[in-house]
Amino acid sequence: MKEKTSIFNKPGFQTLLASVLCAVLGIFLGYIILLLMNPEHAAEGMFAILRNFFKFAGNQKKLMSALGSVLVKSVPVILCAEAILFAFKTGLFNIGCAGQYTVGIIASLYTALALHWNWFFCVLAAIAAGAIWGCICGFFKAYFNVNEVIAGIMLNWIALYVCNIVLGNKTVMDTTKSETHNVKDASLLPAFMSEFFGKNKYMTIAVPLTIIIAILILFVLNKTTFGYELKATGHSKDAAKYAGMNAKRNIILSLVISGAIAGLAAGLYYLTGIEHYKIASSVPGMGFSGIAVAFLGGLHPIGTIFAGLFVTYITQGGQYLNTNYYNPQVADLMIAIIIYLCGFVLFFKTIMSKPVSKLGTAPADTKKNDAENKAADKKEV
């Protein structure tokens, strides 16, 4: 008779529990920080962050509009996490996601503001740019055995400086404000359920497309021969080569697909018009936040969606803090702590997956080994 497995021993449940534990621990540490800064208003501040847009519960239109904004702002975080997850599942650590996201910004905004392309072609340009940037990293990894982390970091900074140069053009940027012009007309993504979300004009097809991409990643990795080959190459390049797979091609393809998803993240975000690109001195944090979100989501494409929504929800909650008592960046500090704790998701999961034996009782395997040893000793005698 097949032995029933406890729900606590199931990998999926352990991952979920580990992720929730990290999130709760991060919120608790955030509360401790609020207490240290201003004990009198700590509870009020934490409540404001966690309540977020629910403060508009009495106004349906404002509530739904604020919810829509959280969904829109979660899109790039989720897709960058999906990009990192895809590469990680194929044995690669794509820390170059930030650079691929940055070239996606270049392609989408330049084609929209300087060339006035239709949104569809602007999105394709962003995907192509991210894919090319991923391909460069993959090429060096496959043919010269350059570690993808080192190559990715170098390409991140190159992408940032190229972005500042290309988008610093007067046709694209308002030089008085050092930020890009508004995306207009045909270059804007089509609206999606805008009326339902309190006439939020930033609610576009970016939201459903993000969910579709996550489902596609899940299907490709788990249900296709192509996905199996990519994962097999990542686990053992030599074994994959021995099995007749083209290991070098698979490495490049993994980073091309990962880069394309990161480029798509930039296109689907900036073509909503919700934010302008500003001349920056550091690489966009979106690519690095994606690492944490991927792990917080248990390295599962669907789990990553919920993790991305949670991180965005807490980040956006900071704007409702009373600035008379706290700096709004306290919410960012909380997210930084949660992101740091995300690295412990696998650690907590490992602890939970260890078999726990009753006090004074040896595990079944140990008993079996002892019995075998005793039998062997009797034979020798």
Image: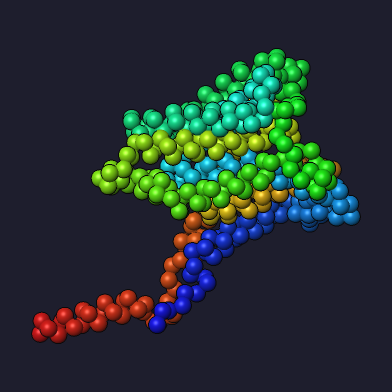
Q: Residue at x 62, y 48 (%)?
A: 211
373 lies left or right of 301: left
Report x, y in % for residue 209.
63, 43
Report x, y in % for residue 160.
57, 25
Report x, y in % for residue 287.
57, 38
**Number of callouts:** 0
Looking at the picture, tell me which residue is in the foreground, 30 or 104: 104
211 lies left or right of 132: right
Seen from this angle, which residue lies furthest left?
A: 381
Q: Is residue 187 visible?
A: yes
Looking at the picture, tell me which residue is in the foreground, 380 or 196: 196
Q: Is residue 100 visible?
A: no
Quadrant placement of the C terminus:
bottom left
* Vertical side of 202 occupied by 56: above or below: below
* Vertical side of 344 occupied by 99: above or below: above
* Vertical side of 186 occupied by 353: above or below: below
Looking at the picture, tell me which residue is in the foreground, 366 or 2: 2
For residue 76, which quarter of the picture? top right
Report x, y in % for residue 142.
35, 34
Q: Residue at x 72, y 40 (%)?
A: 204
Q: Residue at x 57, y 20 (%)?
A: 162
For residue 23, which quarter of the picture? bottom right
190 lies left or right of 156: right
